[in-house]
Amino acid sequence: MNAAPLLRVDGVRKHFALTKGILFAKTLGYIKAVDDVSFDIRAGETLGLVGESGCGKTTTSRMILNLEEPTEGRVLLDGEPIHGLRGEALSAYRAKVQAVFQDPWSSLNPRMKVGRTIAESLIVNAWGDQASIDERVRELLLQVGLRPEQAQQYPHEFSGGQRQRVALAAALASRPKLIVLDEPVSALDVSIRAQMMNLLKDIQAQDDVAYLLVAHDLATVRHMADHTVVMYLGKIVEQAPTASLFDDVRHPYTKALFSAVLVAWPGQAVEEIELRGEVPSPLDPPSGCRFHTRCPSVMPHCSQREPALREISPGHFVACHLFE
Amino acid sequence: MKGETVLEVRDLHTHFFLRRGVVKAVDGVSFSIRRGEVLGLVGESGCGKSLTALSLMRLLPKGGARTIKGEVLLGGENILECTPAEMREIRGRRISMVLQDPQTSLNPVFTIGDQLREAIQRRKRAPLVGTRRADMMKEAVAALRRVEIAAPEQRIGQYPHQMSGGMKQRVVGAIAISGEPGVLIADEPTTALDVTIQLQYLKLLKRLQAETGMAILFITHDFGVVGRMCDRVAVMYAGRIVECGPVRQIFEAPQHPYTRALIASVPKMTGAVGRLATIEGQPPSLMDLPAGCRFASRCTHVEQRCLDAYPGTVRVGDEHTADCWRVAPS
């Protein structure tokens, strides 16, 4: 394991201003979508980012994709800050960091043959002449388990699982170092989901590409990720190597999340933690620990002081007053 | 408290008649549900599970879908023979439905209170003129309280967009059960919800069921939800139920190769992390179904007889059936 991370997210915040009016707009407040988040992704590794809607996982991934500028903090690829890149440097960054999104129905251009969709990033990055581009497209289709002649087909001729393979081939075209996978399998059927997960693992083993896996399904993360980060209302609440997190869940929110995952076989005893209420508004997050309004183990000082993320065993970080 | 059969479906066939041909989306489905029971209907997209539900409600999509054969016995009466006017009386009072997306189930331009009031008024056959609005609103508040919505007096004046997904799905649930139906069809009601909200909703459904004794047909593609919710499970593939049995037996000793492969392909929360089992190939086209077993082209145990003829339903245990040539009848 090499020491220097491929990608470093360093104290990143993203606050969206909520305004009223168009001319002379008045700022009503800030939505703290992501609030002081840091983590590393190493080359060839998978980092799982888990949480419910509104926890900031998508905003975090958008900042990594350089689609969003952080309000504060930095994102570094190979030690170089990624925000503020312009022109060719930005194109080079985009070639190194690619994405596959959730919905394979809307992420492909319906009027473009899939071969052309896959070739797009090769053309943009001046890969070479037409013959070498064709050869690379052929190679990519084979790599994702499709037939080379399918390059001549349009997206509507493919099933959901096949489309997701096309999207993956397009992401792989420029030989990226990191692919952001935003819920890559949740739109797929159960049996197709397993095929896609196996394929992603095979490609990682061949190409040594790193993944940032944004997902809400814990079982998917368990099978894919080396490290897992759990977010709640814009903050990291727990972070650990996947195996040790799944063995020893510490944060009350993570515990509730695990107990809510309905993979329990019938008759299997599970500790059931039903959280009351819903996720509070990120416009006005609770004081102190953001989870204290729903936490089953809440203590008086939880609403006053914000818990810091601290290491409770090697590599396992928790932000909770219970572990101080 | 689990008692008499309240809904029995026999040999249901709902096909789409298109210019290109006939799509046999539901092609010989039979099952029954007892009072106070949850029957899970599981399968992948396109297997016909939602169309089965719509056939039971007699709310088939426009564009050539017709139920051409079979019986749907609700309390012994075949509702496929009811007139549209009789059907309107049955829907909501005796059989109700909750759909996947609460956003599209509610009308965005009316308040929650108005939509509940309309449902309650219809169920009670209260005249639209002359019924005191305040009385109906009181009932609407009670209905919201029943589905555990906090501060129902305030919520009643709100519009759907002011509520979260989980809350909207509760409102839809309140409308669905306002007529005290004997059967509730829930078509993927939690798929659009976050996991912690999903758990709240499932527990609420269970509590409501314990109060009312209604039978629930729970349609889902998620085996985790099945394990938590259902008493029995029916697994659908290409328009037919291929296996049906008590939930424990289906999980622990699945008999049909499709059920076995499907359960094996689900990533687990315990045990070794390795390669996941997959099912190769694609389901057959519903316009051109094979003569034999519909799973034969993807089955790892396929034999000649599987290709020649459909196996028929074999009883493999107590309340447990499978449509496979290889299973031993009990």
Image: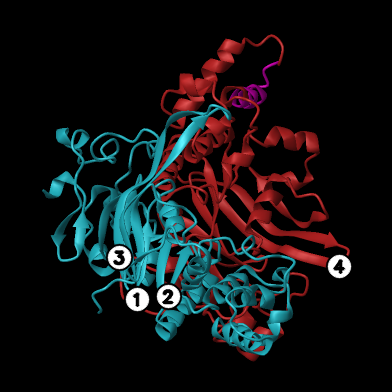
Residue at the location (86% across, 67% down)? B20
Quadrant for the N terminus of chain A, please.
Answer: bottom left
Q: Crowdedness of circle 1 by 10 Å Cα count: few (<14), some, many (20+)?
A: some
Q: Chain of mark 2?
A: A
Q: Is residue A3 left or right of residue A201?
A: left
Residue B20: which disc? 4
Residue type pointed to by label 1: Ala
Please tell me whether residue A11 belongs to the stretch shown in magenta: no
Q: Which chain is cyan?
A: A
Residue type pointed to by label 3: Asp
Q: Which residue is mark 1?
A: A43
Discs 4/1, front: 1
Label 1 to label 3, Cα distance in Å?
10 Å
Q: Main secondary structure of the magenta part?
A: helix
Label 3 element class = strand
User: Can residue B46 be seen by looking at this rendering?
Assistant: yes
**Disc 2, disc 3: CB below 8 Å?**
no
Q: Which residue is mark 3?
A: A40
Which segment is the magenta one?
B115-127
Label 1 to label 2, Cα distance in Å?
7 Å
Residue B210: which disc? none
Label 1 element class = loop
Question: Does label 3 lie on the same chain as label 2?
Answer: yes
